[in-house]
Image (tube, coloured by chain):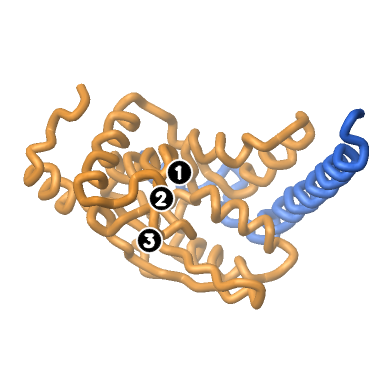
Amino acid sequence: MLIPQNSHIILDTCVLIKASEYSSTPYFDRLFEGLADKHCIPVITDFIRFEFMRGCKKKEHSEVKKNYLDSFVFMDLPFVYEIIKDATLIANLYANKNINNNQISLIDLCNSAFLKKHSENLFLITLDNNDYPVCLHDRVDIQTIDTQKEILTFGVYKFNMNKFNTLNRYLGNHNFIN
Amino acid sequence: MDEKKSVFKSDGQIWDIEKIRNSAQVVHRQEQELEKEEDCQNNQEYANPTK
């Protein structure tokens, strides 16, 4: 895996869901072993926890899901106001680049804002590669799993502050919201 | 983020792949059961729309 040793990595909701879907097979073992070999620290955000847990109808359902998250998520990155502010700014930058903002959800934008906040050592792994455009992110690795039923392409992303600063400066875009 | 603090969980291990798979299987079984329940409910509602 092309990711520095001891990095924190956000596991996107789609990764959590697919890993449970294929849990009776060894398909995800290689991916997780790759992250384990690099001593990566798996994290999620409050929003990812919300997205993963939202379908639970009963307490026992949420306990099963919570137990799954507890089995490998090291910590939840907490929401702070700065995140929504940056998510809005990132959405504005996408809009300016004519990237279809409707397909990129608020949660995806918040994930990018978390990547920006911890741009030194925070990465994200996702199957939704279109949600993390390379105008602001670096795709540092791609991992493919052929499950026979489908081909899963995981992208590993890092926020690129140089790209962000250049784009933001170019657009004179400092104060969309205050 | 404090990396030193976050390297290991209290049980001393970050990635226990066997444990992850086991708990993921429970989630997957639960999802399948819920899907079946929903299908049953939808079929009943379709068969008896007035109920």
Which color is chain B depicted in?
blue
For mark 2, does the 10 Å Cα neighbourhood hold few (<14), some (14 to 19), or many (20 or more) residues? many
Left/right placement of residue A19 relative to residue A96 reads right
Q: Amino acid at mark 3?
A: Gln
* Marking on residue A70: none
Identify the residue position indicated by label 1 in the image.
B6
Subunit ID for the residue under disc 2: A
Q: Amino acid at mark 2?
A: His
**Residue B41's x, y, as percent?**
86, 40
**Residue A64's x, y, as percent?**
74, 41
Left/right placement of residue A13 relative to residue A162 reads right
Identify the residue position indicated by label 2 in the image.
A8
User: Residue at image x 23%, y 56%?
Assistant: A135
Left/right placement of residue A117 relative to residue A26 reads left
Q: In what quadrant of the picture does the C terminus of chain B appear?
A: top right
Pointer 3 with pointer 1, Cβ within 8 A: no
Q: Amino acid at mark 1?
A: Ser
User: Residue at image x 58%, y 76%?
Assistant: A146
For mark 3, does the 10 Å Cα neighbourhood hold few (<14), some (14 to 19), or many (20 or more) residues? some
Subunit ID for the residue under disc 3: A
User: Residue at image x 68%, y 58%?
Assistant: A21
CA gap, disc 2 and disc 1: 9 Å
Closer to the camera in the image, A99 or A118: A99
* Local SS, label 3: loop
